[in-house]
Image (tube, coloured by chain):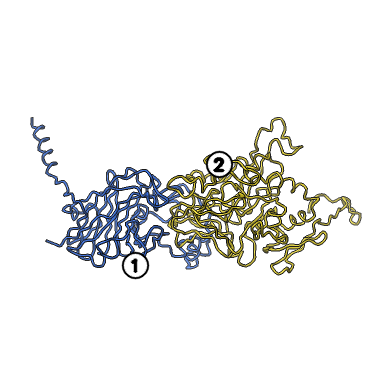
Chain colours: A yellow, B blue
């Protein structure tokens, strides 16, 4: 095992390979507060990539209801239960990662879902925590009874457990964009990656005897376009881009701004130690203890910053960029009340007003002498 | 009394069924015919080597607890081809692939070069390759007629529609191309990805993690369930330089699917001497 630095843990950790960061790292921010679990992302991915034989059960993208939803079944709580989950001292993780907890004979601590675990993709859907008999208690935050939607794709981790687990080196991280792929020519279907990935985002194809996973729609990324699950999101909860290391964060990079500068977007289960590159704006109505377990020690500050967005012109502007263009927007700027999504050279890809103009149409139309009802 | 005599006679006859000659090494006897049928009479006269299996506990990922204890090996050759019959006890038939489902299998490993000091038994070493013939239970099922459909694995699977089944594509080359595109491993020519026309795969390796498909197919085989396990015949071209009165080394591996054995998680032997006998 090599020693590598994981900034999400605030410390060095053990990993199977030495640290080797790509030239730039694909990353994404998902705003959990805007997701309505319509599963349009799920279908956009499904119809694009996994319509073949043996891929029937695969959901490279899925949306699960937390706290009870999970796909495959209990993928999260099972590993949390196995992991010697230590505490955080400030932003430093003092527990052991799945690499540091690997038992004898294994490269990572993992487990393999059984077939039945894939049979309930909508398990726990819309089930809220706690009883609502005495009222749902929605008048204050956090809510007494709550649930939220967690959209998930492969995290294209800086330290992928799938990659570390493969004894054949069939999984690789592209040096040009950090996207993690399974080499379909080299894979021999041992399912070690399925066992190793804590997010269970590698799937075994029983027809081809190989494992397959989210490819971050790399043919689109190569053309400067965001992946299918991003551009089809009707809630506009997602933004794809590139993330820098914290010390190299650029204020004109929207992902760096959200993750490193505003610190409102957090990794999912950072304690596993993979440095995942999909970042979540945590839900504002959920008990903090739950958010901390999922998103780490920055959860409270992130919720606070998000709730204060109306008073932070830059943050409010940044949030308006989500879903505003199908193009990747590596840079951004704000001028007054307008936010601009820019390409690498600073050319404008999209302009979005921070506040959309509002028109109020009178219920009674004097010209046609008719009362308009709320229909198109 | 008559019954007693009959029983005694039966016991005597059973005793006359010759126990196989056991050898300390794998001895390949000459045979005019090579058959991949494990019950063929060509195997009757061949001596048997009982190979003890060890857990692969040297390279991660490994198994730490032994499963299949031993494999019984017989061998015959005809001067051009050499065949091995491997028999082992395995109460479960694991021939259905799937998530967290693993397959029964076995493999025969021979150094590519015939030399006094063989390469590392852990799948060879850099510049000193080993040749491996690998048989797997699900490939045997495919060759025996299992269909290349998801319903052959999950009989109750319901599929609304595959895009390549569109009416407008029926019977066209475009349909075949599209179906292949939706099976990425097949599209890039991964031999392992099927559909299989042989239960045996030819491989070469120069150390752990280097297993690659061999350039050309040189092995064939057939496996069948026995009362208590598997009997598998793997026949391959006699390695270059190996022939009557020559010797080399051989190693075996067995995978027990229901024990989640796959890849490096296997029971294996070290090198065992292989002696090729001339015809009498």
Secondary structure of residue under mark 1: loop
Query: On the rendered structure, is B156 left or right of B7?
Result: right
Query: On the rendered structure, is A35 left or right of A114?
Result: right
Which residue is drawn at the image coordinates 37% and 59% (left, top)? B207
Q: Which mark is residue A80?
A: 2
In the depicted view, which residue is nearer to us: A247 or B219? Answer: A247
Which quadrant would residue A321 be assigned to in this image? bottom right
Q: Residue beneath label 1, please?
A: B216
Numbered disc 2: what chain?
A
Q: Residues within 10 Å of mark 2 (few under 14, many from 20)?
A: some
In percent of width and height, residue B106 lies at 32, 53
Regarding residue A112, the answer to whether it shows in the image is no
User: Which numbered disc, 2 or 1, marks the residue closer to the eye?
Assistant: 2
Q: CA distance from mark 2 to mark 1?
A: 47 Å
In the depicted view, which residue is nearer to us: A268 or A134? Answer: A268
In percent of width and height, residue A270 lies at 60, 48
Q: Same subunit under labels 2 and 1?
A: no
Q: Which mark is residue A304?
A: none
Q: How many marks?
A: 2
In percent of width and height, residue B187 lies at 47, 64
Numbered disc 1: what chain?
B
Q: Are marks 2 and 1 in contact (CB under 8 Å)?
A: no
Quadrant showing the C terminus of chain A: bottom right
In percent of width and height, residue B280 lies at 11, 61
Regarding residue B65, the answer to whether it shows in the image is yes
Query: On the rendered structure, is A181 left or right of B146?
Result: right
Residue B90, above or below A278: above
Which residue is drawn at the image coordinates 71% and 38% (left, top)? A143
Residue A222, above or below B145: below
Which residue is drawn at the image coordinates 89% and 56% (left, top)? A368
Secondary structure of residue under mark 2: helix
Q: Residues within 10 Å of mark 1 (few under 14, many from 20)?
A: few
């Amino acid at each position: 095992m090599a020693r590598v630095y994981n900034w999400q843990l605030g410390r060095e950790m053990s990993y199977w390979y030495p640290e080797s960061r790509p030239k730039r790292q694909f990353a994404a921010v998902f705003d959990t507060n805007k997701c309505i679990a319509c599963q349009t992302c799920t279908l956009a991915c499904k119809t694009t990539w996994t319509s073949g034989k043996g891929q029937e059960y695969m959901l490279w993208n899925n949306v699960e209801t937390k706290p009870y939803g999970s796909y495959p079944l209990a993928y999260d709580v099972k590993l949390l239960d196995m992991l010697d989950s230590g505490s955080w001292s400030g932003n430093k993780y003092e527990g052991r990662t799945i690499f540091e907890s690997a038992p004898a004979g294994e490269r990572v601590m993992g487990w393999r879902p059984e077939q039945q675990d894939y049979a309930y993709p909508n398990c726990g859907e819309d089930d809220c925590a706690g009883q609502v008999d005495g009222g749902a208690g929605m008048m204050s935050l956090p809510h007494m009874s709550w649930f939220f939607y967690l959209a998930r794709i492969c995290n294209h981790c800086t330290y992928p457990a799938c990659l570390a687990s493969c004894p054949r080196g069939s999984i690789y991280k592209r040096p040009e964009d950090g996207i993690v792929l399974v080499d379909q020519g080299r894979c021999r279907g041992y399912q070690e990656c399925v066992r190793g990935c804590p997010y269970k985002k590698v799937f075994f194809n029983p027809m081809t005897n190989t494992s397959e996973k989210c490819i971050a729609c790399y043919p689109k990324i190569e053309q400067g376009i965001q992946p299918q699950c991003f551009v089809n999101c009707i809630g506009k909860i997602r933004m794809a881009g590139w993330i820098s290391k914290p010390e190299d964060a650029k204020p004109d990079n929207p992902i760096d701004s959200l993750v490193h500068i505003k610190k409102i977007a957090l990794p999912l289960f950072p304690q596993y130690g993979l440095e995942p590159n999909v970042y979540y704006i945590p839900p504002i109505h959920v008990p903090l203890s739950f958010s901390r377990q999922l998103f780490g020690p920055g959860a409270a500050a992130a919720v606070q910053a998000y709730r204060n967005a109306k008073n932070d012109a830059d943050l409010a502007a940044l949030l308006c960029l989500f879903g505003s263009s199908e193009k990747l927007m590596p840079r951004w700027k704000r001028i007054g009340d307008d936010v601009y999504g820019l390409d690498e050279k600073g050319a404008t890809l999209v302009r979005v007003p921070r506040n959309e103009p509002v028109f109020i149409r009178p219920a009674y139309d004097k010209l046609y002498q008719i009362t308009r009802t709320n229909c198109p | 009394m008559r019954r007693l005599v009959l029983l005694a006679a039966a016991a005597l006859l059973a005793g006359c069924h010759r126990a196989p000659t056991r050898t300390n090494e794998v001895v390949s006897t000459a045979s005019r015919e090579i058959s991949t049928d494990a019950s063929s009479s060509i195997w009757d006269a061949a001596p048997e080597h009982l190979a003890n299996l060890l857990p692969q506990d040297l390279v991660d990922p490994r198994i730490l607890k032994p499963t299949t204890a031993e494999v019984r090996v017989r061998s015959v050759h005809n001067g051009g081809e050499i065949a091995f019959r491997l028999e082992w006890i395995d109460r479960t038939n694991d021939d259905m692939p799937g998530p967290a489902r693993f397959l029964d299998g076995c493999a025969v490993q021979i150094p590519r070069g015939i030399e006094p000091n063989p390469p590392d038994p852990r799948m060879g070493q850099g510049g000193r390759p080993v040749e491996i013939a690998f048989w797997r239970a699900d490939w045997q099922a495919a060759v025996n007629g299992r269909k290349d459909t998801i319903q052959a694995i999950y009989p109750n699977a319901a599929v609304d529609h595959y895009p390549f089944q569109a009416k407008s594509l029926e019977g066209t080359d475009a349909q075949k191309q599209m179906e292949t595109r939706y099976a990425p491993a097949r599209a890039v020519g991964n031999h392992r990805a099927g559909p299989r026309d042989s239960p045996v795969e030819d491989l070469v390796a120069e150390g752990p993690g280097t297993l690659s498909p061999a350039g050309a197919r040189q092995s064939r085989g057939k496996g069948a369930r026995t009362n208590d396990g598997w009997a598998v015949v793997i026949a391959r071209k006699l390695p270059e330089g190996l022939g009557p009165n020559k010797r080399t080394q051989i190693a075996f591996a067995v995978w027990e699917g229901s024990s989640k054995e796959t890849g490096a998680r296997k029971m294996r032997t070290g090198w065992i001497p292989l002696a090729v006998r001339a015809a009498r």
